[in-house]
Amino acid sequence: MNTPDLIALALFLVLWMGYSWITDRAKLFDRVSLTRAMSSQRAVWIRNAMHRDLRMIDTQIMAGLQNGTAFFASTSLLALGSCFALLGATEQVFAIFNDLPYFFHGSRAGFETKVGGLAIIFGYAFFKFGWSYRLFNYCTILLGAMPMSGDIHKDPAGADLAADKVIRMNILAAKHFNKGLRAIFLSIGYLGWFVSPFLFIATTIGIIIVLVRRQFYSEARLAVLERLD
């Protein structure tokens, strides 16, 4: 890899880490992210569930969260397998690239390195989704362990502690899910590297702009968190 490739890769990693930090822990121009807004709503949900006698609707919501996580975990695993298949078809890919303009040409080692990096991204996403699925499973168990609404008055402190456990586990599961989803989104920008490091920079910045807008300037954020700014 040459200097532009290294600069593009470094920018990709810096923007990824910076976006993750701003979204999960900091603010952007005093704006709270949509992700953090939804964490507050998760706490409200569990607190409300604690006062319901029948919690079938809550278990259905939890099942929906698990199913969505499982879908993305399967997708990441398929994408990871495709990367290894692409490595096995390097000769055919290079034959296609050689017929394209010089702009698409590169070394075989460089191509394999880029595919390896893409495989790492999908592998990272798979492990995040897999762990998130496991945590949502634990969250379901903790939800079932919460005392019934009629028993809360017997031990209010214990009931609050049980609810806090569910909330913390649910937020943690969502945190890992968001990290996996973030990797999937940024992998789209990574694909620009197969054409040119300059396109890699452009696609990465473009993806980050879209994600920042959705987290801090979208209508979804206004619907959830506008009054808390």
Image: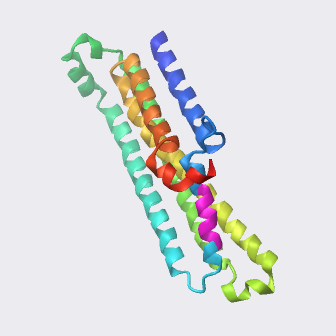
Front residue of this view, candidates 204 and 99: 204
Find the residue positioned furthest to the bottom: 150
Check the image and report above or below for 158 versus 79: below
- What are the residue bounds of the magenta stretch? 39-47
Residue 115, position in %: x, y?
A: 40, 30
Q: Is residue 213 left or right of residue 84?
A: right
Residue at horizontal 55 percent and vertical 81 percent from the top: 55
From where the camera sits, is residue 2 visible?
A: no
From where the camera sits, is residue 222 visible?
A: yes
Q: Is residue 206 left or right of residue 166?
A: left
Residue 68, position in %: x, y?
A: 43, 60
Residue 211, position in %: x, y?
A: 46, 39
Residue 5, position in %: x, y?
A: 46, 16
Residue at horizontal 60 percent and vertical 50 percent from the top: 36
Task: Name the dominant secondary structure of the magenta segment.
Answer: helix
The verdict on residue 55 being magenta is: no
Check the image and report above or below for 225 versus 216: below
Q: Is residue 149 left or right of residue 98?
A: right
Check the image and report above or below for 192 versus 21: above
Residue at horizontal 38 percent and vertical 51 percent from the top: 75
Front residue of this view, candidates 20 and 37: 37
Check the image and report above or below for 198 versus 211: above
Q: Quadrant of residue 150?
A: bottom right
